[in-house]
Image (cartoon, rainbow, N blue to C red):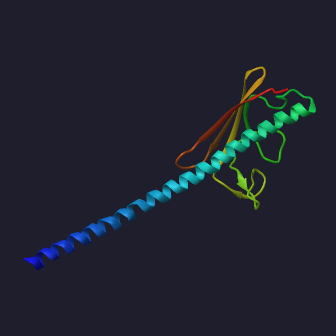
Amino acid sequence: MNKAFTLIEVIIAISVFLIGILGVYAVIPRIISISSTNISRFIASQLGREGIEIVRNIRDSNALKGNDFDDGLNNGDWRVQYNRDFLLSFAEIPLKIDGNGFYNYDSGSLTNFKRKVILSHPGTDNLNVKVEVSWPGEGSPLVVEEILYNWR
């Protein structure tokens, strides 16, 4: 009876071990999927932040030049690019990434990310900036919003 009991213990131990290994293998695809989604959301959040910073830079440049704070910042949908100090007309064009890691519309490899900057004037001395970054996949779109004021 002792030998049979030991055989049952070994079978149970092997079963528990196999269930543990199968559980790990079942979780790995989900971890990879979540990791991919998080990478896309992180890139999208940085692209959204960059969009707001570009609009802020245009507003600040206007003030330094003595222009109205919202000169060239009209209501509507726009595109922006890090090396431009003006808004680009909107089109559903994916961003490209160049050899230096900069996202733009001019050169580089196509990405899955599209960025739309939506401007509106809720008052005379403020500007609502909403940046929507979209991509195919889970978690899209990501929206970042900020109100910029006439600080002058």
Above or below: residue 56 compared with residue 152: below
Above or below: residue 75 compared with residue 81: above
**The N terminus appears in which quarter of the rendering?**
bottom left
In percent of the image, x 64 and y 45: which residue is there?
Answer: 45
Residue 24: horizontal and vertical position, in percent?
Answer: 38, 64
Residue 123: horizontal and vertical position, in percent?
Answer: 74, 20
Q: Quadrant of residue 61?
A: top right
Residue 73: horizontal and vertical position, in percent?
Answer: 80, 31
Q: Quadrant of residue 68?
A: top right
Nearest the viewer among 150 and 129 is: 150
Q: Is residue 112 left or right of residue 36?
A: right
Furthest toward the right, the residue is 65
In percent of the image, x 16 and y 72: which residue is there?
Answer: 8
Q: Is residue 120 left or right of residue 70?
A: left
Furthest toward the left, the residue is 1
Q: Quadrant of residue 87?
A: top right
Residue 23: horizontal and vertical position, in percent?
Answer: 35, 62
**The C terminus appears in which quarter of the rendering?**
top right
Above or below: residue 41 compared with residue 129: below
Task: Report if residue 69 is visible in the image.
Answer: yes
